[in-house]
Structures are given as structure tokens and as C-alpha cells.
Amino acid sequence: QAHLVESGGGLVQAGSSLTLSCAASRRAFSALTLAWFRVAPGKEREFVAAVSRTGDTTKYLESLKGRFTISRDNAKNTVTLQMSSLTPEDTAVYYCASGAPVPSGNFRHYTYWGQGTQVSVSS
């Protein structure tokens, strides 16, 4: 059974950094794109970042470039999202996703989803 588990969320102050991790239970995930999406209170699901199977291609929400960095470790079946200079607008539940053949910002391209981890940024 495909399984993704996010960790690393929490409550931080504006300007802080935070790193989210997602562990995949199946080795097959190393052959697929991994991504992060988020859902802020009262808003639609939003693409954050994606990384290709080999890790050499990444895709970001344009407004997050320079603050967020996605990376993966296929040996450990994990994907990491490093977030810096956080603002209250980054408050959301962050979800790990997998299954797209190439990095994509369209959530419909992803088959597997984690349960999410809450990130709250106070002003």
C-alpha cells in the first residue's frame, strides 16, 4: 500500500525557517515525481514545489522561489522542503504528493497523498 508521511510542521514566528520532511513507504516512489502542496485556511489547494525522479529538475510556485527549496533522497525514500523567511501567509497544511511522471503544479497529476502537516506562522 502506498504511504506518505509528513513531519516537521509546527508553530514558528515570522522570519523563521522550517524544514518539512516526507517519508515514502514504497521504494517505487523513487521512480516518480515528488511534490508539496498546501492548503491555507479558506483557500484552495496550492502547488508549492516538485522534484523529478532523479532530483535534477525542480519546479516551484513562482512567488516562493528563493525562499523554499525542495530536495529528495531516493536512498532514504524521502523528500524535504526547506522554507525560510516565513510569513503568516505561509500558514497552511502542507501535503506531500507523489505519482506524477514529471514535475507538475497540477494536483490532478498526483496519485498518492500524505495526511498533511500543519505549519503556522505568527506575526
Image (tube, rainbow, N blue to C red):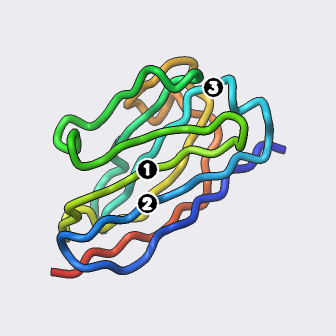
Q: Which label lies toward us, 3 or 2? A: 2
Residue that numbered label 3 is attached to:
32
Q: Are marks 3 and 1 in contact (CB under 8 Å)?
A: no
Is residue 37 placed above or below 5 in the rendered structure?
A: above
Residue at image coords 32%, 52%? 44
Q: Estimate the x, y position of residue 113 in percent, counting from the top left.
A: 61, 47
Dividing the picture into quarters, in which one does residue 21 lie? Answer: bottom right
Residue type, mark 1 in image:
Leu
**Numbered tag placed on residue 123 in the rendering:** none
- The mark nearer the N terminus, 3 or 1, is 3
**Distance between the alpha carbons at the discs numbered 1 and 2:** 6 Å
Mark 3 or 1: the one toward you:
1
Residue 108 appears left or right of 99: left
Task: Give SS at disc 3.
Answer: loop
Q: CA distance from mark 3 to mark 2?
A: 22 Å
Which residue position holds label 1? 81
Q: Residue at x 69, y 30 (%)?
A: 30
Quadrant including the N terminus: top right
SS class, disc 2: strand
- What residue sits 20% from the left and 35% below the top? 62
Dividing the picture into quarters, in which one does residue 98 lie? top right
* Apparent side of residue 48 relative to residue 80 in the rendered image (left or right): left
Q: Amino acid at mark 3?
A: Leu
SS at circle 1: strand
In this picture, is 68 found above or below 53? Answer: below
Q: Please name the residue that numbered disc 2 is placed on.
A: 19
